[in-house]
Image (cartoon, grey):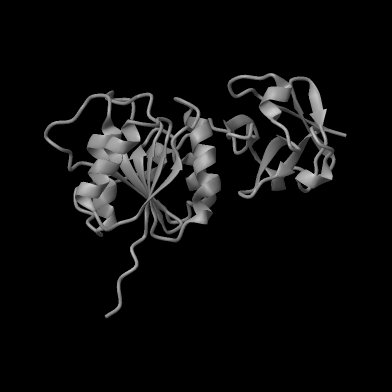
Amino acid sequence: MSVPILAPIVLFCDFGLPYTGQMKAQLFAGAPHVPVIDLFHDVPAHDIQAGSALLAAHVRDFPKGTIFASVVDPGVGSDQRKPGVVFAGGWWFVGPLNGLFEHVLRQFGEDAKAFEITDLPRVTSQTFHGRDIFAPQAARLALDDRTGLKPLDITTIRESAFADDVKAVIYSDGFGNLMTGIRARTLSERHTLEISGRRLPRYRTFSDAEPGELFVYENAVGLLEISANQGNAREILKISGFPSLKITEV
């Protein structure tokens, strides 16, 4: 007898432990046989635009049918956004309809659909909809249960103010590499990237740079990334947070 292959649930959020553990408890309760994959637990805090760009860049790594339980939600508990679901490009996205799925819709939005989650638990925390609303909804979708979803006009959840390419650092990993929100394919070889007053060369890979040299390259998800060969770009640049970038044409 063949065993059905279940599409995974992917966690994407701006908070870490213990909150992701609490979300996983709800996912296990609702869909115990569905695999759960941790993608990001440390999206820049409260930064919906950065989260939107990061999410869209990583979608293609996952099979169609994957459910992204996504939470960057500074308006949690308020009337600023609806809790909802988006279906785009063959993937499901569960989370606050606050612009977090804008870049997904720009890249995969043909024939996309949006829904408001109306089947809400009787008791929810005002500040943790990730656990109380989005995780249970992701579990239901994983079991192909689409009850309690009210269709929405997708234009009502769009965020036109977001840039197609976010000219800023939107993520920093443990090596000190600085991922930007700029798609590499949008820039020609005539363009240079500047951060903290320094123009950086663009190389193909780490070994093209001298040890300790700062450079820019196209990373594995198609975004420009600032790195140092065998070094920590964040420490070399002495930056904190997620600074903006300047692009110049030479």
Q: Position of residue 101 (x, y in %)?
A: 44, 41
Q: Is residue 143 left or right of residue 197?
A: left
Q: Is residue 166 visible?
A: yes
Seen as rendered, the residue at the extreme right is: 250
Q: Is residue 191 left or right of residue 132?
A: right
Q: Is residue 160 visible?
A: no
Q: Is residue 168 left or right of residue 70?
A: right
Q: Position of residue 25 (x, y in %)?
A: 25, 42
Count of all numbered marks drawn on residues in the image: 0
Q: Quadrant of the C terminus?
A: top right
Residue 77 sits above or below residue 57 on the image: above
Foreground residue, 171 or 64? 171
Foreground residue, 42 or 181? 42
Q: Quadrant of the N terminus?
A: bottom left
Q: Position of residue 182 (x, y in %)?
A: 65, 38
Q: Residue at x 62, y 30 (%)?
A: 169
Q: Is residue 100 left or right of residue 58?
A: left
Q: Quadrant of residue 4?
A: bottom left
Seen as rendered, the residue at the extreme bottom is: 1
Q: Residue at x 34, y 39 (%)?
A: 95
Q: Position of residue 122 (x, y in %)?
A: 11, 34
Foreground residue, 115 or 179? 179
Q: Residue at x 42, y 59 (%)?
A: 90
